[in-house]
Image: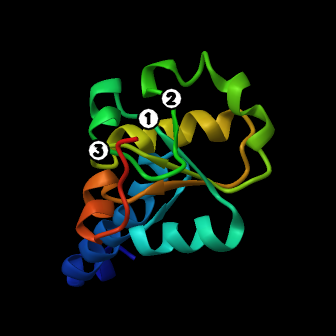
């Protein structure tokens, strides 16, 4: 076995790196699946998914996905009771770029939400896809 590894060190390293890349999203988002803006739109329209925006109030005020619920990431654990009834529905979590929402997805999964998805790229990707944004 050691002889194989020595003779094929490049292939072994490539396998290790690719395996790590496959595991990274699971570790980062608590096992939450990532969705593109287009995939999120389909989930909203076809599966009645709810969007939870975890950005801060000043970010929320500048524009958001129509129909989204606002619960800042720092308040999510304390305010889980407000969204308890949504556990069986698909939940799409968004923030500005996808980092805070990935963490929030982990919180929701631990709280028993079964269908949790992170909006890849956050509101930035939503805006880039020219999807509707409201400030009302």
Q: How is the image coloured?
A: rainbow
Q: Which residue is mark 2?
A: 71
- The residue at 28%/70% (across/down) is 130
Q: Which residue is mark 1?
A: 54
Q: Between disc 2 and disc 3, whose residue precedes?
A: 2
Query: Above or below — where is 79 with respect to 133?
Result: above
Q: Between disc 3 and disc 1, whose residue precedes?
A: 1
Q: Give residue 116's position: percent from left, percent from top.
A: 61, 52
Around disc 1, counting alpha carbons within 10 Å, would you say few (fewer than 14), some (14 to 19), or many (20 or more)? many
Task: Determine contact: label 3, label 1, CB under 8 Å.
Answer: no
Query: Above or below — where is 107 with respect to 64?
Result: above
Q: Secondary structure at mark 1?
A: loop
- The residue at 29%/72% (across/down) is 129
State the residue lying farthest toward the top: 78
Q: Give residue 61's position: percent from left, percent from top.
A: 32, 33
Task: Determine contact: label 2, label 1, CB under 8 Å.
Answer: yes
Q: 33 or 85, which is in the foreground?
A: 85
- The residue at 60%/15% (across/down) is 78
Q: Which residue is mark 3?
A: 96
């Amino acid at each position: 076995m050691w002889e194989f590894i020595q003779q094929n060190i490049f292939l072994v390293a490539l396998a290790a790196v690719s395996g790590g890349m496959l595991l990274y999203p699971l570790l980062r988002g608590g096992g939450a699946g990532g969705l593109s803006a287009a995939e999120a739109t389909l989930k909203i329209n076809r599966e009645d998914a709810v969007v939870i925006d975890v950005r801060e109030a000043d970010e929320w005020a500048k524009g958001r996905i129509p129909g989204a619920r606002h619960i800042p990431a720092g308040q999510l654990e304390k305010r889980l009771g407000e969204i308890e009834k949504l556990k069986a529905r698909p939940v799409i979590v968004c923030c500005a770029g996808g980092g805070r929402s990935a963490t929030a997805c982990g919180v929701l999964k631990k709280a028993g939400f079964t269908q949790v998805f992170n909006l890849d790229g956050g509101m930035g990707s939503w805006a880039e896809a020219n999807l509707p944004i409201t400030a009302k």
